[in-house]
Amino acid sequence: MKKSCFFYRKKKYSLVQNGVITKKSPSNIALIKYWGKQKNKIQIPSNSSISYSLEKVYTETRLIYHLREKKKRSIKIFFSGKENTSFLPKILEFFHRISLYCSYLRDFNFVIETKNTFPHSSGIASSASSMSALALCIMEIEKKLVSSLEEDFFLRKASFLARFGSGSACRSIYPGLVVWGGHKSIKGSNNLYAIPYPYKIHPIFTKMGDTILVIDEYPKKILSSKGHQLMIHNPYAKERFKCANKNMDRLISILKMGDLQEFGELIEHEALTLHAMIMTSHPYFLWMKPNTLHVLYKVWDFRKQSKKNIYFTLDAGANVHLLYPIQEIVSIRKWIYSDLFSYCKKIIESFCQ
């Protein structure tokens, strides 16, 4: 039996009253990047990935549901207090994809009210936090219908559902280091939902500082979903997938031993490889901005001169995540504000949980 079969919820249910559920879910920053989906499959990654969930960078979603009296479904979406119809097609597609596993959703109409602590669609994984928050809300409905629902199943299915809205959203269900995508060296890893990283982690990596430099706060002109599609015909895609899986093996050792320099070299290499794939797609494009490059060079120079453990990573956008051990937080954050503030629109302080 396929793993997905365990998540079927075919029986129809009825609630005697309407309800409101509120959930928060974090954004995440990938260390080993997910970039590229298996052809003709829905949100199945071409390589395994691992991310940190971010403590202060999150989406808060309020889901209002009430029993349908008419056949036509009604879903309204409000973002930061204003109705936003541009998000509706993605939400409708999400509900369609998960209907097989959550048949009870057909009995309700919904109002979705959502807000972020950071700019959306700018390369800080807003789809990850928003879709995972919505998946958690939906699972709370299921929990009301199925009193015997266990916590482990609740979270696994929430991750499974979130994946249909945004691949990286499945990793935002859990705190800490989270793995998605089957990998021979990680027990329990699979393509259908994420799992908490199951192996030993050196104390230096259990909580790290993460400063996000918002270089460009406007929505990206080319969304990540389009970038994933372009990997299908990228001439370097197959080698990239092999490289990512090899880097996962390398990271397992690094996380166990606590080697910060090896960690930094690996995550920077992963970040630049991601953008190399973007630049070698057809059509090719750039998400980095001039100030992105200024920041990267500044980080390299500062690290060489100060011997501080500060490293960058990038998601699919222009903005820069700076990761560093909390033991060095005071001096590093002082340098960030004195030397990097002029290159960005704003600075967001967070922690890797």
Image: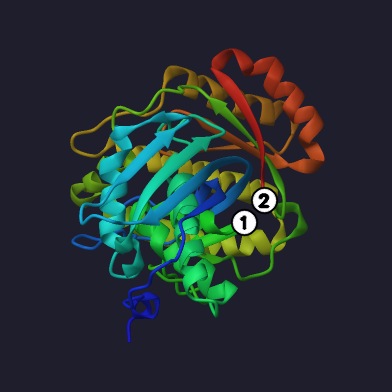
At 37% from the left and 79% from the top, the residue drawn is 3
At 23% from the left and 63% from the top, the residue drawn is 41
- Looking at the image, tell me whether mark 2 or mark 1 is earlier in sequence order: 1
Which residue ends up furthest to the bottom in the rendered image?
A: 1
Q: Nearer the viewer, residue 35 or 94?
A: 94
Badge 2 crowding class, 10 Å Cα cut-off, few under 14, some 14 to 19, many 20 or more, is many
Labelled pair 2, 1 in contact (Cβ < 8 Å): yes
Amino acid type, mark 1: Pro
Amino acid type, mark 2: Gln
Badge 1 crowding class, 10 Å Cα cut-off, few under 14, some 14 to 19, many 20 or more, is some
Disc on res. 175? 1
At 51% from the left and 74% from the top, the residue drawn is 153
Q: Is residue 308 left or right of residue 169?
A: right
Which part of the image, by quadrant, shows the N terminus?
bottom left
Position of 150 relative to 120 (above/below): below
For the residues marked 2 and 1, what is the alpha-carbon distance in whole angstroms? 6 Å
The answer to which quarter of the image holds residue 309 is top right
The answer to which quarter of the image holds residue 330 is top right
Determine the secondary structure under disc 2.
loop
Q: Is residue 158 left or right of residue 198?
A: left
Q: Is residue 138 left or right of residue 267?
A: left
Determine the secondary structure under disc 1.
loop
Residue 183 x, y percent position in the rendering: 44, 70
Disc on res. 333? none
Regarding residue 44, the answer to whether it shows in the image is: no
Q: Disc 2 marks which residue?
A: 353
